[in-house]
Image (cartoon, rainbow, N blue to C red):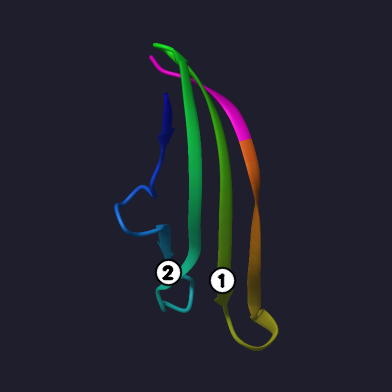
Amino acid sequence: MIYTSAPALPGTADTLAATPASGKPTTPYSSRSATLRWQFSPRTALAIAYRYLDMDYEDGKGSNYFKYDVATSGPAMGVVFTF
């Protein structure tokens, strides 16, 4: 059998909200992934995935200004054990 997975919340991406020292809330983290899973025994499966991760964070002013803006993506593979 082959299964596919959706983001953690149906119809949305996983998000993490943060409140930096400036007090302005931001949403610096966004993640999307697609996974194929082959269940070859009742408790063991092989998973192949592709993930996109985007982080955009900034805080401070003047000499204390900090900005972190990165996007990365790529394949992943692993064994899933179900207890």
Which region of the structure is painted magenta? 77-83
Answer few, some or many: residues within 10 Å of disc 1's Cα (few below 14, many 20 plus, some between 14 and 19).
some
57 or 65: nearer the eye?
57
11 or 29: nearer the eye?
11
Image coordinates of residue 11 in percent, x first then y, are 31, 58
Instruction: Please tell me whether mark 1 sits on a helix, a strand or a loop.
Output: strand
Instruction: Please tell me whether mark 2 sits on a helix, a strand or a loop.
Output: loop
Q: Principal SS element in the magenta part?
A: strand
Q: Disc 2 residue type?
A: Thr
What residue does disc 2 label?
A: 19
Q: Residue at 41% across / 33% down in the picture?
A: 3
Q: Residue at 29% across / 52% down in the picture?
A: 10
Quadrant of image for the N terminus: top left
Query: Which badge, 1 or 2, comes first in the chain's sequence?
Result: 2
* Residue 77 drawn above or below residue 63: above
Q: Residue at 49% across / 55% down in the picture?
A: 32
Pair 1/2: label in front? 1
Image coordinates of residue 81 in percent, x first then y, are 47, 18
Q: Disc 1 residue type?
A: Tyr
What residue does disc 1 label?
A: 57
Q: Is residue 79 magenta?
A: yes
